[in-house]
Amino acid sequence: MVIPDPSNPKRLINVYLEPLIKKMLQLWHVGIRTYDHVMDNAFIMRATLMWTVNDLPAYGMTSGWSTAGVMGCPVCIDDIRAFHLQHGRKACYFDCNKQFLPEHHPYRRNKKAFTKNRVENKVARPRLTGDNSLIGCKH
C-alpha cells in the first residue's frame, strides 16, 4: 500500500514499484513451480495484476497518465471538453460529467443548475476493450 505524505515522491514512485513490477513480470513470463495438493502434481503457475484500487492522484502516479490540466481525464482520453477559466490558468471540467448520466436523466436538460446554459446531448464514449487499448498503444 502506498500512502503519500507531504514529501510525496510523485514521479519517483517507480523506485518503490520497480521490485514489484520485476516480480510480476517474472510471474507472467516465466511462472513459478507450484504444487497442487488436490491433483497431486506440480505445475507452472503464472500470475498478473488485474486491477488496483486508488484515488485519481495515485492513479496518475501508478499509470503514468497525467491527471491534471486539460488532458487530465483518463476516461475521455482524447475527447476532452475541458476549458480554461476566464480569469485564471486552471483547467475546468465543470459540466463535462453530464455526458456520463443516463440518456433521459433530468440533469442532462437542466440549463439553470449548470454552466454554459446548454443541454447535454452527447453520449459518453464506450469503455475501451483490451483490444482497442492495444490498438491505441500501437498508434
Image: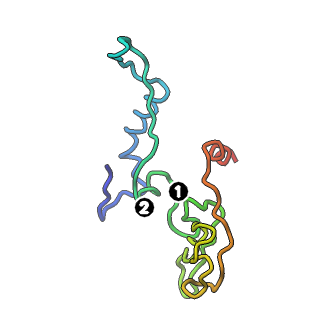
Q: Position of residue 1 (x, y in %)?
A: 31, 49
Question: Callout 2, which amino acid?
Answer: Pro
Q: Nearer the viewer, residue 67 or 128?
A: 128
Q: Which residue is drawn at the image coordinates 34% and 60% (left, top)? A: 8
Q: Single out the residue that lies furthest toward the top.
A: 40
In this view, the residue in front, 75 or 86, is 75
Q: Nearer the viewer, residue 123 or 78?
A: 123
Residue of label 2: 57
Secondary structure at badge 2 equals: helix
Left or right: residue 138 versus residue 52 is right
Above or below residue 12? Residue 101 is below
Residue at image position (58%, 70%) is 70
Relative to 84, does residue 19 appear above or below in the rendering?
above
At numbered mark 1, what does the secondary structure look like: helix, strand or loop? loop
Q: Identify the amino acid type marked 1.
A: Trp
Q: Residues within 10 Å of mark 1 (few under 14, many from 20)?
A: some
Instruction: State left or right for residue 115 relative to residue 54.
Output: right
**Disc ID at residue 81:** none
Q: Is residue 91 above or below residue 17?
A: below
Q: Quadrant of residue 112?
A: bottom right
Label 2 vs 1, first from the N-terminus: 2
Coordinates of residue 80 in the picture (x, y in percent): 63, 67
User: Position of 139 compared to 6: left or right?
Assistant: right
| Residue 105 in the image, given as x and y percentages of width and height | 58, 72
Residue drawn at (38%, 39%), measured in percent from left and top? 20
Give the distance between the C-alpha atoms of the residues marked 2 and 1, in whole angstroms.
Answer: 10 Å
Q: Give the image quarter of residue 126.
A: bottom right
x, y percentage for residue 21? 42, 38
- Viewer-side residue, 106 vs 112: 106
Q: Which residue is mark 1?
A: 65
